[in-house]
Amino acid sequence: MSVKAFELVSAVEREQLAGEKTRIGVECIECCGQHLYVGTNDGFIHHFLLEERTTAKGQLSFSSQKLLHKQLGLKKPPSELKAASALERLIVLCDGVILLVDMVTLEPVASGGTKLKGVTVFCVNENPVTAEPFCVEMAVASARRRAVHICTVHEDRFQILKEVATPDQPCDLSVDGYFLCLALPTRYVILNYGSGASQDLFPYDSEERKPIVKRIGREEFLLAAPGGLGMFANAEGISQRAPVKWSENVIGAAVCFPYVVALDEGFVTVHSMLDQQLKQTLSFREGHILQDFEGKVVLASTKAVYVLVPLPLERQIQDLLAGHRVEEALTLTEGAQRNIPKDKFQILHKRILQQAGFIQFGQLQFSEAKEHFRKGQLDVRELISLCPLLLPASSSFTRCHPPLHEFADLNHLAHGDQEKVQRCKLFLISYLREVRASESANGFRQDVDTALLKLYAEAGHEGLLELLVSDNSCLLADSAPWLEKHHRYFALGLLYHYNGQDAAALQLWVRVVNGDLQDSTRADLFEYVVDFLSSCKNLDLVWKYADWALQKDQKLGVRIFTKRPVSKEQTRQLNPDEVITYLQKHNQALVLYLEHVVLERRLQKEKYHTHLAVLYADRVLALISRTSATEEQLSSARQKLQRLLRKSNLYRVQLLLGKLQDSELLLMERATLHGKLEEHDKALHILVHQLKNSAAAQEYCKWASEAHDHKKRGEIFHQLLRVYLDPDVPGGPRTVEAVDLLNRHSEVFDAPKVLELLPEAWSLPLLRPFLCGAVRASMHARHTSQIALGLARAENLQLHHDRLKCRGGPIVVSEKKGCHLCHNTFSEPDCVCLPGGTPVHTHCATQKLKGSPTKRQVDHAHTSNHT
């Protein structure tokens, strides 16, 4: 889990501090910009100027120049230094006394009230609450009292603002705003000196080890807790970060976000505040001071001063990525967001996500890789470029520099393992499908679609056809050779069609159907070509390939004409006459097309109906003359002919009758034709005496009369009855059939006329069903007429009643009754009734009408009309 986050660089060598003196040691340090102040155990303060330099290898180094050193003249060495740069003062704690020293001359400020005595520890408030701009606010722990003094530091004096009582003598402290974080002898406490509220944090034994109280941010502190833990606490006493596990013997701690640096007797440890893991360990002997100054971490041993130089964040992240530690790299990147400008962070974050995606892609962790590619808004062509030749030759894409990954291509990534290569390509297919469905492919849609087509073709993926029949941007020049290479000729035809090259598409498909090219994509390719031609706008292509299709299969080929949608555009519409002429040499196709025109499209033209009927008749006659024809074939052909003869009224009846006149097997058809000519007696004679089919004769009567009124229908049935009762035909009258006809269809016959036709020898019981039906029908008609008459009378009576209701009752007018409008009594019987029956004078009603809006509108209309 290690990562190189810092480099230890020497800042001040031993010789610069002590020279030839061997007992000189560092007691305290302070850094302000380029100025470094070092307090030594001989009572001196040394002032150095630090200059940063970059070596030829790109490493950071420091050169220090001693500007001045000055002895304070006190009995003990300084124990703590703090710079107040705005005042050009050093705040020095020495032998329990705080005094002010000039930062340039290191001379103590000689004026009254410049010392604070009896001080154990102090700290500067980086988040001051005072409004004075030219002063520094600090908190001071008193050695004599259980209290903390809130002071302000000016150029020449200290001013105590407030004394804050504490539960015990503080061993260490830190301050932020109104919040004091105190290390008491047995516990840590957070105290709000503005409100007086306090919060105990956790126990701690200061006698066992030195407490650490470090402000790390606004209202947040880092504390050394029991068990070797570095605990975080905010002003409410809540830990919003997980603790870091450091050494039991920590001497000092500093924060350089996102790291916590800790110093113990022999090492410097670096922990991440983001995942609390140990990231780096540096050996450092005799160290006893660790502090951070404005983001700069400074270390001091007893003899020298060093700076922990943080490596650039991007370098740390790249080191993590180089070790394939993706999650750590992402955590570090996201955690450092607050320290990086927003625009720069977005660029950095996207790139890290993209690099992380490629690392996981190389590890075949496809779902994680896809998520990182998506969040990082990866230019998908970076991924496509891993497969040679997928990008079209016209693409202007070049890989990102510096590169996002170390792979030359998929073979390099998979180390030649073709199974892994195929898995990567399948992922690429799925990812490209998602990309093209979103808006992220805008601007390079051609590259994406062409690459996807090539992957589909290579893998034999079903998505190839879906891509080509949908809206796509596949480049024909790049895609066509690739499809030919992988024998995807049907798909290539679709691509030609999408690019408006229907002639090339058809030529290719015809070669596949003929067997010149091999492509098993569609077993029904011939049917597809026929359907394609049926909707093709280019009529020249239709005529060019129609003969080929009809020679292959007339039944399927004729669908070029029968399945063609009816269009209002004359340029796309085929003339039926031209089609019929063209199909003369393809008899089966001609019949099917005429069936389409007559039976499906229902074109009302005599020549089409006659032509189809003649073809039907020729087919039937041919089957009759052919000895090998089966009964089933003949029956089917006759059914088609009979159906057309009965349903159509447009064919030339005499022509067909002449063709069928000599055939004794087609009596039913001849009867139908006579019926079309209204020659019902001839038709019925054929059915009754030649076919001897009574049921067919009755069915004929139903068919022939279905479009006529009751009277005409009765006449046709009477004709059949006369045929049955004709005594001059061979075999004499057909009494049984006549009786059956009367009894079955009694409702259509006129009973008196029937009784005139019947022989006197027939008995009444024989005709009982007919007579009962006739009487019932007569009674029904009589009753129906009576009911209709009664209903008409009732309706008339109701209307008369409604009219009488509309008339008003009598109006009583007397001399004692007044007009509702003028309130005068009536002197004459003439009056007008208002709605509701209220009588008023005639002249009052007239006056009211003249003043009404309706009357004014009417008058205006009349005036306008006259005008």
Image: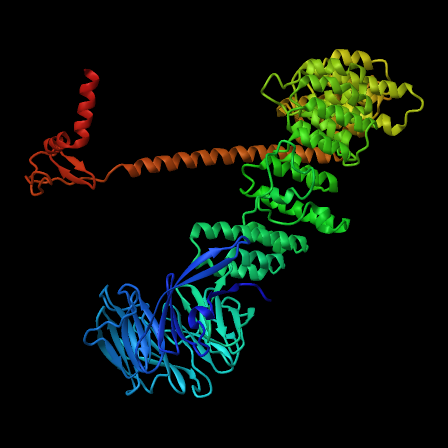
The answer to whether 655 is drawn above or below residue 395 in the figure is above
Q: Closer to the camera, 46 or 704?
A: 46
Q: Residue at x 78, y 16 (%)?
A: 614
The count of marks equals 0
Q: Which image quadrant is residue 595 in?
A: top right
- Where does the image place residue 835, in percent across and percent down from the top left? 20, 39
Image quarter in which the C terminus is found: top left
Relative to 841, say whether 505 is above or below: above
Residue found 47% across the figure and 53% down from its top: 345
- How is colour applied across the structure in the image? rainbow
Q: Quadrant of residue 718?
A: top right
Q: Is residue 66 above or below residue 717?
A: below
Residue that sits furthest to the front in the current view: 20
Q: Quarter-wise, where is residue 700 in the image?
A: top right
Give the quadrant of the N terminus: bottom right
Residue 133 image position (x, y, % from top left): 23, 63
Q: Is residue 274 visible?
A: yes
Q: Residue 695 or 422: which is nearer the viewer?
A: 422
Residue drawn at x 65%, y 47% is 430
Q: Position of residue 519 (x, y in %)?
A: 79, 34
Q: Is residue 426 left or right of residue 330?
A: right
Between residue 252 and residue 467, name the one nearer to us.
252
Check the image and name the residue furthest to the right. Answer: 627
Q: Percent from the top left, x then y, of residue 524? A: 77, 33
Q: Does residue 186 sit above or below 420 in this rendering?
A: below
Residue 753 is at least partly visible in this image = no
